[in-house]
Image (tube, coloured by chain):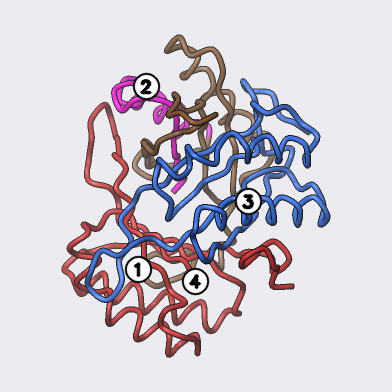
Chain colours: A brown, B blue, C red
Amino acid sequence: MPRITIRGLSVEQVCQISTRVVDQLAEICECERDYFTLECVQHAAIFDGQIVPAYPFIEVAWFERGEEVREQVAKALTNHVLGLGIPEVEVAFTTYAQDAYFNNGISFK
Amino acid sequence: MPRITIRGLSVEQVCQISTRVVDQLAEICECERDYFTLECVQHAAIFDGQIVPAYPFIEVAWFERGEEVREQVAKALTNHVLGLGIPEVEVAFTTYAQDAYFNNGISFK
Amino acid sequence: MPRITIRGLSVEQVCQISTRVVDQLAEICECERDYFTLECVQHAAIFDGQIVPAYPFIEVAWFERGEEVREQVAKALTNHVLGLGIPEVEVAFTTYAQDAYFNNGISFK
């Protein structure tokens, strides 16, 4: 954690930005690079009866780190996606409670 | 957003209801049709050692719109799924905080 | 519900533990075995430009059942995964509000 789930980008596009994104996020969050996981969601998106390209969307699931860090992370992710030539992306954050997150059976509370 | 993630229906079934569902939800939510995204989750469901058909389940991720709208959205989604001859479906809502949701790096707060 | 979403294990590994996990969770949660769904997430995980094995991670989405039950569920899931020879796993819980969860259009409030 943070777990970063990416929809609407190809595996190749995620690979392309993956090193620099994690470099930057580790710096912003002041944590190890290998805390981050990137996952490329490949479910079918559907609109008006047809399979369509998925809208670019990134979800960050983590412990709350406050508004300033959240905004920096959103901007960093956005800039890397826009840098691929993708015109628009949404980034959303969901938070885990520390007493509801366990590593090998031990919670973070 | 709203993002609608559907499990336990085939891509064909989601295609079949997709136009009318979005028509109705746009009316209930008083927003543009293209705010909605539909995603068809196709992960393996497993029970007692075997891959089984996934239980029909829909998750709506959005900003809170209040109980009345939530109930209308749940009923609309349910009716469209039942109309496919599926006997049972669950619909769950998760909400984003406005200051934790960003479009091109700008939050909705 | 509870919905258990598993990442970083193969379908075969999930099949292997599925019966005993559900036996144990039904006992801990004092509910029917068939309330539980297990889903095996198979999205690509990416790190430093490459597809990599996904980090073992389990998400439990349910109604809040309190700290004691939560800890027992985390430990049970963890033990079954470690029993497969996997050295590390994280387990996170997310909760639904009862008035935001609907079965066939009727909420649980």
Q: Secondary structure at mark 2?
A: helix
Farthest residue, direction top: A85
The amino acid type found where label 4 is placed reads Pro
Residue occupying image coordinates x 49% and y 31%: A49
Residue occupying image coordinates x 81% and y 57%: B67
- Residue stretch in magenta: A1-28
Judge the density around disc 2: few (<14), some (14-19), many (≥20) Cα neighbours within 10 Å: some
| Rendered image quadrant of residue A87 | top right
Q: Secondary structure at mark 3?
A: helix
Q: Is residue A4 left or right of residue B18?
A: left
User: Disc 1 marks which residue?
Assistant: A104
The label nearer to you, 3 versus 2, is 3
| Rendered image quadrant of residue A70 | top right
Residue C2 got which mark?
A: 4
The amino acid type found where label 3 is placed reads Leu
Q: Report the chain holding disc 1.
A: A
Judge the density around disc 3: few (<14), some (14-19), many (≥20) Cα neighbours within 10 Å: many
The amino acid type found where label 2 is placed reads Ile
User: Disc 2 marks which residue?
Assistant: A17
Q: Main secondary structure of the magenta part?
A: helix
Q: Is residue A12 magenta?
A: yes
The amino acid type found where label 1 is placed reads Asn
Q: Report the chain holding disc 3.
A: B
| Same chain, labels 2 and 1 | yes
